[in-house]
Amino acid sequence: MLGTGFSSVLYLLPVLQGNEQEKIANKLLLRDECPSWIYEIKMGATSICESWDAYAEDGTPSNYSMNHFAFCCV
């Protein structure tokens, strides 16, 4: 499960890539199941949500902020 703070996620993919872990970086970036950035898009989000589980699997939104900066660093 992905669980990093928003201050460190900015560095996560470049560090993985710089340490010959491109496959892991690509898998992380392109993942479309929760938790992931693409999961939010898949559920209909047009901005970054406050929580990875802001949308239920059936697409029902939660009470979290749907316009949040915390996960947008990628």
Image (tube, rainbow, N blue to C red):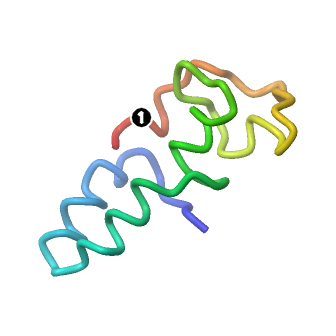
| Quarter the N terminus occupies | bottom right
**Above or below 57: residue 50:** above
Above-or-below relation of 74 to 26: above
Above or below for 59 versus 13: above
**Residue 58 at x, y percent in the picture:** 87, 39
Residue type at mark 1 is Cys
Residue 73 is left or right of residue 11, and the answer is right
Q: In the visual, does 23 lie left or right of 34?
A: left
Q: Nearer the viewer, residue 19 or 50?
A: 19
Image point (35%, 39%), residue name = 73
Instruction: Say what secondary structure mark 1 lies in.
Output: loop
In the rendered image, residue 32, in percent from the top left (x then y), is placed at: 57, 51
Report the residue at 41% width, 34% height from top: 72
Residue 52 x/y as whole percent: 65, 45
Query: Residue shown at 34%/43% (left/top)?
Result: 74
Residue sitting at x 36%, y 73%: 24
- The crowding category of the residue bearing disc 1, from other C-alpha atoms within 10 Å (few below 14, some 14 to 19, many at least 20), is some
Position of 21 with respect to 29 (left or right) is left
State the residue in front, 74 or 69: 74
* Residue 61, image quadrant: top right
**Residue with the most extreme left position:** 18
Q: Which residue is mark 1?
A: 72
